[in-house]
Image: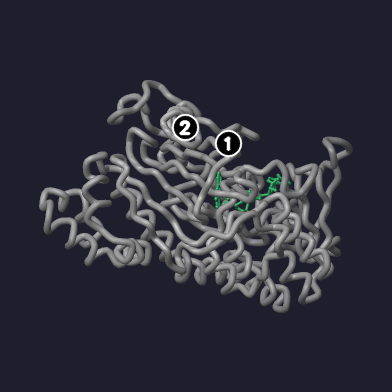
Amino acid sequence: MEYDHDVIIVGAGPSGATISRILAQEGLDVMVFDKRKELGEPVRCGEGLGAREIVAQGIDIPKQCISTDIHGAKVISPDGSEIVWKDKETTGWVLERKMFDKWLMEQAVHKGARVQSYTRVFDLVKNDGKISGVKVTHGGRDPYEVTAPLIISAEGMEASLARKAGFRALSTLYDVDTCYQYEMQEYDHENLIELYFGNEVSPRGYVWIFPKADKKANVGIGIGAHLETGEKEGGIKGATPKEYLDRFIENHNQLKKASRLQDFGGVISVGAPIDSFAKDNFMVVGTGARQVDPIHGGGIALAMESGVMAASTILRAHKAKDYSEEFLSEYEKTWREGPGKKVATRLLLRKVMESAKDDDFNYIFKTITDKDLNDVMAGKFAGPVAKVVAGRPQLMTLLKALVS
Ligand SMILES: Cc1cc2nc3c(=O)[nH]c(=O)nc-3n(C[C@H](O)[C@H](O)[C@H](O)COP(=O)(O)OP(=O)(O)OC[C@H]3O[C@@H](n4cnc5c(N)ncnc54)[C@H](O)[C@@H]3O)c2cc1C
């Protein structure tokens, strides 16, 4: 069969843009479709990005895509105790994501990839039962078919095409956080991201303040979507994330006087990745595959990292002219042995944290240090757990899953 392209990528977010750049650079004919009218907009993101993974990928983000440099994090417990945590784990940026996503895609276009905005991919094309292309519509008009031996879903949370291809790319309410965010001004800050924990503040989640240039800040919240929110300790009966966020802002000395420049809501996975990432002639990459950090819902760096891994397998598949599930699954194996291990550890930590009461948070945050936080985020739980349990043995019931 003659194909229109070597690869079709659905979605021009960080994962789709990364794959298309690498494939185009190696001479593949890559076509990217995105349903957005303008790439990168509207922004539905806290825009925080850790430097470590991005530097490791050799990506030099230009100034116009960065709003503020971040020098560390401040983690705040329900009673207001703080841990200031400055480390390579917490160094990074708050982006201007609408510029960043567009810039990432422009890098792919410079290498020869083609992208078409305002074009929704709404179905698969099959030939003798084999996936061989997609059906698209530009601006909702005149559907047409485009073919390629390999289709990549880089669709983000929706993952509707991936589901049509037979992937179980659906999350339970338990495994997603529902979010609300304001862009606010004016907010004085110290180039630290601020993370507020506690059931009263944000049941099974946290409130974030991510500072931006011009005294702006992204002030947002994510709460466990499954919760009967009013029934948790200190909760607001039947409340939405917005109501929790509004209450937080009313009680915050600086923010209560600040203006709101933008509102938006969203949903992000904090669960496990989907069961498999590849089938014959089809792959799922990035947040569509639920490759997201279950502790904080960050998915930009993981989407780009998976993009690099997927691209490496695709280049080999292209050379071998083998797009079978067996061949494409090499990407899944590499991912699960690398970033997948970290995601699994973070998922365990999330599940332990969600059973903590406010008093437990207060005690833990008073007992551990920034160095302990480094260990915790690196999956080395034994030292910090021993420290906490030494002073409050009854917390062993809560924390034992981390050390067994
Ligand atoms: C409230 C909120 C705050 C967040 N804050 C952070 C943060 O601070 N830091 C962080 O790292 N992550 C954050 N995230 C997560 C982050 O935004 C995602 O993990 C990341 O964007 C995933 O990249 P991706 O390329 O996989 O998918 P996306 O960035 O979602 O890109 C998918 C693209 O596919 C397109 N698309 C989807 N379906 C179709 C279709 N059928 N046809 C054509 N185009 C299609 C979409 O238009 C979109 O452009 C946040 C998420 C939410 C909801």
Residue displayed at 12% across by 58% down: 390
- Picture coordinates of residue 195, whole percent (x, y): 42, 47
For the residues labelled 1 and 2, the Cα–Cα distance comes to 10 Å
Horizontal and vertical percent for residue 76? 36, 47
> Can the viewer see residue 98 in this picture?
yes
Label 1 C-beta lies within 8 Å of the nearest ligand 1 atom: no
Q: Amino acid at mark 2?
A: Ile
Residue pictured at 73% horizontal, 64% vertical: 20
Residue on which disc 1 sits? 182
Q: Nearer the viewer, residue 351 or 216?
A: 216
Query: Which residue has dot 2 on it?
Result: 249
Q: Position of 1 compared to 323: left or right?
A: right
The amino acid pointed to by label 1 is Tyr
Q: Nearer the viewer, residue 80 or 24?
A: 80
Helix, strand or loop at label 2? It is: helix
Q: Are marks 1 and 2 in contact (CB under 8 Å)?
A: yes
